[in-house]
Image: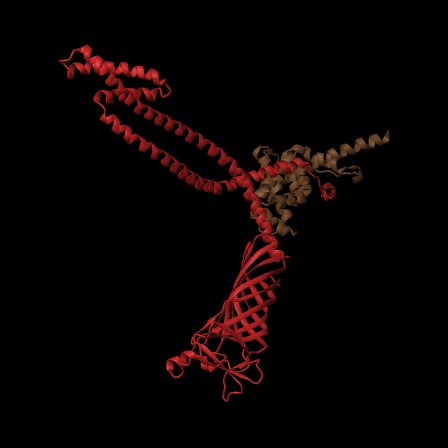
Amino acid sequence: MNENKNIDRLFQEKFKDFEVFPEPHIWRNIEKQITKKKKRRIIPLWLRFGGAAAIVLFLISSGFWFFNTESFNNGVPNEIIKINSEKNSINRNSNNSEGKNEKEPTSNPIQKDKENSSNSELTKNSENTIINKSESEESFVKRDEKKINDEVKEGENALFVTSRLVQEFKVENDQKALSEIALEEIFDKQKSVLNDVVAEIEINEDKVNEVIEDSKWSIGSTMAPVYYNTLRNGSPIDPELANNNKSSNDNLSYGLKVNYKISDNLILQTGINSLELGYTTKNVASLLSSSLLEGSSTNINTNVQGASVEVISTARQSSDGTIQRSSFDPSGTLDQTLGYVEMPMELKYIILQKRIGVNVVGGVSTYFLYRNYVSMRSFGKTTTLGEASNINTLNFSGNLGLDLDYSISKKLFINISPMFKYQFNTFSAYSGGFQPYYFGVYSGLNFRF
Amino acid sequence: MSLKKLINKCKKKDNKAQSEIYQLYAGKLFALSLKYSRNYQEAQDNLQNGYITIFDKIGQFNFEGSFEGWLKRIIINTALQTYREKNVLNLVTEDIPEEVDLEMDEEQVSLDFLLILIQGLPNRYRLVFNLYVMDGYSHREIANMLSISEGTSKSNLSRARVILRDKIELHQSIIKKNEAF
């Protein structure tokens, strides 16, 4: 037993850290074998693509063929009519020589001419005895020879056309066969190239996905057309305008956003946006009084000193019929513009993070008011009335939306994000039941690192 | 890059990852192949075939147990397969020979010499000796792997030891003689 341990131990200890590096060609052999296997695995897929490509090519080539046979068909009926209009002898003749022509499509036309005429003479001889019994053989031969020759020539012409077409058809068939072989060769070559490309693409795709998964930060621009509206009717400017038609202007938001990946499935998103919201109320007229109007409910502070503004709805007035004075433009509109600096703070939940990324976004935004004015457009002129007096300089919104990414490269990706933002704390005082929200599809180019 | 990532890339047939895995274990696995083979050429073939199997089957490795252990099993199985195919395992000697003490100076015995001794063993003695002594398989496992009885495994091991001891002693006596001159 002792001895067993002894010899076992000797080998165990000696071979404990035994490592020998094989020659470099071993790896090359292995690599060759495993890539061969990989190709074999991919081929069926490419055969399918190849099959699809072959069908497309077949359709195209058969389209060409059809196109070519179209001209073939166009030519043939004429010939058939010609041949049909010939005498039987010629018809037979042409049939004979057609057979010949098919056999020797390249034979000399002059030689053929001779053959044909001798041929026709033979037929003519036998026919003549039947048809023209009374006429002498000699005179018939002389008289008819010319005629027959003409007919033969005509028939010959038809035959030339036919034989040429037959030839063309043959050539076409040969070309088709050749092109099929060539196509197969090309396919084979393409297949192997494609396999390599596919393998490379797969590897690159993995690399890209890895970078996408690994990178923590991204920064990018955003730009969005914004649709601004209210959940409830009403006018924050004056209760008088509550029932007037209102619409969102073409608004734009743009800015910068920064993403930080905090865990495997969460991203923190913040940034800074400029947001301008415009809202138009239709059928409005404004009055500028020199003194404060008693009981004015218009929430506009004019910049004209000592004056106050009141707006009235021309829609109501005209329907009442009480005021029809020409000093109002019945189609005058009131435009309210609010400019904000928006700072969103959102969380993105990752649903998919590959070359295509899908996230759900939720969060809040803080808004700082930097622009606030109300203007009036009547008789084609725009006049600034002043600023809305009931807007908070600081307000917020709750945000919800989707976020879709597409990576153009490892570092660059396009982002499209439809967002719904529900504002609150917009008004400091009377809001007329106006509950603003806006919807924007934000898009931009982002850089990850 | 972590080993797990590398393995996952190999599962996707990433050429670079395969090359890295190869380089990482080639030394150990070639050494293993050398022990189980009769010569250098056979060991190269075994390593090559083993690695092809590894990259073919790497999708089946599910991170249970050590990766190196998994690789070694494949290399060993490749070797066993070779000798099973060659049908050279049909040595039948069930009797266990008597064993005597080995007296030697370990320093005088080189690794290369021991490797030559192992490679020089008859196929089944070599396989059993390697499996039992070098890679820690039990006689029951060996019996299973080689489709022999446990008794045959034990007797093969003893015979292997006797042959090895005799050759080492012979070697040492030659060295002593040389020293005497």
Residue at position x 75%, y 35% from top? B168
- Let me know if residue A374 appears in the view: yes
Q: Nearer the viewer, residue A42 or B112?
A: A42
The answer to which quarter of the image holds residue A127 is top left
The quadrant of the image that shows the C terminus of chain A is: bottom right
- Let me know if residue B148 appears in the view: no
Specify how the rendered protein is coloured: by chain
User: Compared with residue A295, is residue A348 higher up or lower down, i.e. above or below?
Assistant: above
Looking at the image, residue A363 sits to the left or right of residue B116; the answer is left
Q: Residue furthest front?
A: A326
Q: Nearer the viewer, residue A408 or A363?
A: A408
Q: Residue furthest left?
A: A134
* Residue A200 picture location, percent across and down: 57, 44
Q: Nearer the viewer, residue B96 or A372?
A: A372
User: Which chain gets the red colouring?
Assistant: A
* Residue A147 picture location, percent across and down: 23, 18
Colour representing chain B? brown
Q: Nearer the viewer, residue A143 or B20?
A: A143
User: Compared with residue B95, is residue A128 higher up or lower down, i.e. above or below?
Assistant: above
* Residue A290 picture location, percent across and down: 53, 86
Residue at position x 31%, y 14% from top? A114
